Amino acid sequence: MGLTNNSTGIKAVDSGLVIRKQTPNDKIIAVAGNPNVGKSTVFNSLTGLNQHTGNWSGKTVTNAQGYCTHGDMTYVLVDIPGTYSLMAHSAEEEVARDFICFGDSDAVIVVCDATCLERNLNLVLQTIEITDKVVVCVNLMDEAKKKNIKIDFEGISSKLGVPVVGTIARKKKSLSNLMQSVSELLNCENKKVPIKIEYNTTIEEAVDIVEPILKQKLNNKINSRWLSLKLLDYDETLIQSLNKYLSYDIFSDTEVKESLEQAVSYLTDNGFTKESLRDEIVSCLVRTAEDVCSDTMQFEEADYNARDRKIDKVLTSKWTGFPIMIAILLIVFWITITVANIPSEILAKGLFWIEDRLTDLFHYFDAPNWLHGMLVLGVYRVLAWVIAVMLPPMAIFFPLFTLLEDLGYLPRVAFNLDKYFKKCCACGKQALTMCMGFGCNAAGIIGCRIIDSPRERLIAMITNNFVPCNGRFPTLIAIISMFFVGVVVCPFNSLFSAFLLTCVIILGILMTFAVSKLLTITILKGVPSSFTLELPPYRKPQLGRVIVRSIFDRTLFVLSRAIVVAAPAGLIIWLMANISVGDLTLLAHCSGFLDPFAKLLGMDGAILLAFILGFPANEIVVPIIIMTYMSTGSILELDSLASLKQLLVDNGWTWITAVCVMLFSLMHWPCSTTCLTIKKETQSLKWTAVSFVIPTVIGLIVCFVFANIAKLFL
Amino acid sequence: MNTLKDLKQGQIGKVNSLLSTGSMRRRLQDIGLIEGTDVECLQKSPAGDPIAYLIRGAVIALRSEDSSNILINY
């Protein structure tokens, strides 16, 4: 989960899972694991896919699949959501359990964190209860080595009765060992017997009542001992899944039903309640894990996390927590603005030079004017703008942001801000979904799945749009540089731009809080639900990979999406600007129609029209504004921000217009992809409409109030 | 009886029992928080709540509403 080709844009909308084998002999391997143990990295290294990875919990929310070859075997690997347990307390756990149970996988790789193995074994044990085809992959061995943690793989393997392999996901060789174990397991070369978790004798006796009957009924399609336990525990979601996948209704079978009733009453007679049964089962798993690790792991330094604790003391302390958070935001923007300026200018010059040559070419061939207009002044010019203005900030912002993500800083942001989210009766993890929103709001919406409470999830979805995505913040940067700081490059100027941009972002964050609060006291009433947030160890990011990944996964993808929308938009705008009805062009009709209303908001018809036409992608808002102005006025060379500013000023822009455009850009309807994603995620037109209307209404009000107050003082 | 919420920074307590119910109880058990588990209070967030605890080698932040439902012995 994250910003990849498959999670942003239109592909985000569809995320069902059908396993596609390349050959009938492909073995299906499920890759399971706790959140944030490098599971996606293992999956990516094995399959070569770009599943996005980052150092925080809850990245994979849908099943992803990829292919891998080892020796003469071919595999379909399925990356299932990271979970602590398979007891189906949340949507992800249900997906994970259903896949392991009913997904027809030939084996399951459970990825564990070597620095936190004992807790990870809980999931391993639960998986072993379902299937004996399990390989334990103890990942992050490099981190464990740094912390001087020694692990006896042989010892753990003989206790668990399944292969245990230590890996460093980035090192191909260790993964090859992993796949070797998988192939040995599938070829039945594993002579060990998987561990059987012994429960309290009463529970065992109750299981003995049910198990033989289930075994006979289910034909070994599913582990009967495990199923008996779950049925005694009355796991409702599992009963539904049995119905769904095996078309087997457990309660219509009188024999099973009777034995279950008998076993349950046996448990009740022996003093077990539903709650205490579950407690006993969980405690038993935890104690078994404790036992497995007791003499197989050595911590040479008692305080092996001391460094992380020291960093936490600075990054999340009362006095320095918030200033550092704001400073980091500021620095990220400052670097983005300063560094992006130069390539932006070069790109603009280069692309407009090409435009001139294209024009020459069209003249040379005596091409008709309309063709030149449509292709060069329409399509090409919009494309050039999108590339020149959008690409450099993205190419710099994304690696910086990925760096923060890899370091493990983002969960600390959630930790710092949770109290305020709690005050709004929302969830601190909303901060993580907002961070995703910086990349793409649609991805942010999908990221909301990490929030367990449906009410809090809806709040996070509706307010995600108050974080400007990459389609919007280059626009903000451009306007800030043109109107509020000199256009000359100088370090203090760009620091000031970064400061202003940070203020805009903070305004967006405050809006998020305000709207979350507003929602909780109106249409989404409720109390904050309980909350656990894991703060993962800090990890040293690999610079090379961060850069490559953010350029390929994010920058190029997001840019290509912008271009796909921008090219036809350029064409349509040019046509609208050149087809006349009466004595005015279509564009002039439309913008003229919107003008009186837009003026109330401190903008003009052309700007409002651009926002409306920018519904498919926010990236094209500014190019549309430019085209509209240019079609009515003088044509000029737009090879620098200075000349662009001149164009805007000639068309009546003042600083009030600039502020209103920024405010409206921050607060208006989500783009079409985001709307579709909200529809898909909520399964509700009503909530999609709410998510559309709320930011729009707030944007209209804020712009109206600001414009009219500002005009009073002018 | 003391609760986890009463732990001072740096103090370690042993879980006596969980008063939480429903999904929160299960979530806590999933991360290994059962009777007898040692928990260390690590760090308050800037606003004082939530607080980060060391639970079986992992750092988990809990809100005060939830940590006050976990009874501990020193």
Image: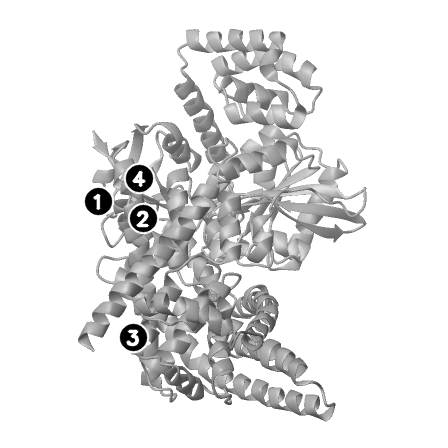
Give the farthest residue toward the front. Answer: A582
Residue picked out by circle 3: A656
Task: Please check whether the numbered discs 2 and 1 fall on a single chain.
Answer: no
* Comparing labels 3 and 2, the label whose residue is closer to the camera: 3
Position of residue A189 in the picture relative to residue A315 (left or right): right
Q: Amino acid at mark 3?
A: Ile
Label 4: state its secondary structure.
loop
Residue picked out by circle 4: A528
Instruction: Identify whether A652 is placed above or below A608.
Output: below
Question: Which is nearer the N-term, disc 3 or disc 2?
Answer: 2
Label 1 resides on the chain identified as B
Q: Find the distance from the CA under tag 3 to the CA under tag 4.
A: 39 Å
Task: Please check whether the numbered discs 1 and 3 fall on a single chain.
Answer: no
Q: Nearer the viewer, residue A685 or A436?
A: A685
Q: Find the distance from the CA under tag 1 to the CA under tag 4.
A: 25 Å
Where does residue A95 sit, x and y in percent of width and height?
56, 37
Quadrant of the rendering where the C terminus of chain A is positioned: bottom left
Residue picked out by circle 2: A516
Question: Which is nearer the N-term, disc 2 or disc 4?
Answer: 2
Task: Please check whether the numbered discs 2 and 4 fall on a single chain.
Answer: yes
Q: Nearer the viewer, residue A139 or A58?
A: A58
Q: Amino acid at mark 2?
A: Ser
Label 3: state its secondary structure.
helix
Task: Please check whether the numbered discs 3 and 4 fall on a single chain.
Answer: yes
Q: Residues within 10 Å of mark 1 (few under 14, many from 20)?
A: some
Q: Residues within 10 Å of mark 2 (few under 14, many from 20)?
A: many
Q: Amino acid at mark 4?
A: Pro
Residue under the image location 37 percent in, 63 percent down: A666
Instruction: Identify whether A218 is placed above or below A13.
Output: above
